[in-house]
Image (cartoon, helix red, strand yellow):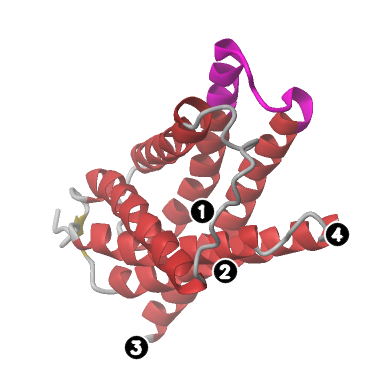
């Protein structure tokens, strides 16, 4: 690997990690604040308010991650417009939060959590497979949206879809593992620390895998 490539590769991983850490941290803060202020939404209007706030959280996450990624990509694809790339990244982040919040807000019965029947425990391997499967789907969607911004400036840009699918499969696994490790007896500082570590590892995972694909992309001749 040439020196400039190594430099770009390392900076890409660091910026993905930092962008995801700050972005998902800010989104998580909005989620916690919403729960503290509103509690569990009961009326339809409250559910729509929560949905709007979480879409706002997605917009914030997409803005931060999109900016950190763009400032590295533009070093290789000099004509890549900042507004276009960030707009597509924000759009997919908002869409992800929107789709992710719909089941718990509108499709899971309100008395489901109060049911006395015990919840079956999921085998750890099955849990990892499910989280990676979700990351694979969401990552492909994420890569597709960013592909629309990259296709005029990078070739073969369609590889970016696979890159993000694989990267987010591993990244989502990190997020889910650290999100489910705590229980009701876990100290708050450990919960916060685990969330930070999970977000950091997710960003590194996404940056590492997409960075390998980034090396294969070439600028489109103008």
Question: Looking at the image, is mark 2 or mark 4 nearer the viewer?
Answer: 4
Q: Is residue 14 magenta?
A: no
**Highlighted magenta segment, given as a residue range:** 36-53
Q: Give percent across and percent down for residue 206.
A: 44, 65
Residue 202 image offset from top left, x and y in percent? 53, 64
Q: Quadrant of residue 83?
A: top left
Quickly name the residue at label 2: 201
Crowdedness near tag 1: few (<14), some (14–19) or many (≥20) residues, C-alpha within 10 Å: many
The mark that comes first in sequence, 2 or 1, is 1
Residue 108 lies, with reference to residue 203, above or below; the image says above
What residue does disc 4 label?
Answer: 187
Residue 109 % position (x, y): 51, 28
Q: Is residue 191 left or right of residue 43?
A: right
Q: Which mark is residue 68?
A: 1
Secondary structure under badge 1?
Answer: helix
Q: Is residue 219 visible?
A: no
Residue that mark 3 sits on? 1
């Amino acid at each position: 690997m040439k020196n400039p490539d190594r430099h770009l590769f390392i900076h890409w991983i660091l910026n993905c990690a930092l962008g995801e850490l700050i972005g998902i941290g800010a989104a998580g803060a909005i989620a916690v604040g919403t729960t503290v202020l509103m509690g569990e939404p009961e009326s339809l209007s409250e559910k729509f308010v929560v949905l709007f706030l979480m879409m706002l959280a997605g917009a914030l996450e997409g803005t931060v991650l999109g900016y950190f990624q763009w400032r590295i990509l533009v070093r290789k694809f000099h004509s890549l417009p900042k507004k276009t790339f960030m707009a597509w990244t924000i759009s997919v982040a908002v869409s992800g939060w929107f789709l992710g919040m719909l089941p718990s807000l509108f499709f899971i019965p309100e008395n489901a959590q109060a049911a006395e029947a015990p919840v079956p425990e999921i085998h750890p391997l099955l849990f990892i497979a499910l989280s990676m499967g979700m990351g694979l789907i969401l990552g492909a969607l994420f890569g597709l949206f960013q592909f629309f911004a990259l296709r005029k400036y990078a070739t073969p840009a369609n590889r970016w879809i696979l890159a993000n699918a694989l990267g987010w499969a591993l990244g989502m696994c990190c997020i889910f593992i650290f999100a489910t490790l705590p229980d009701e007896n876990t100290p708050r500082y450990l919960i916060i620390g685990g969330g930070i570590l999970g977000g950091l590892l997710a960003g590194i995972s996404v940056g590492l895998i997409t960075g390998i694909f980034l090396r294969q992309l070439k600028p489109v001749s103008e």
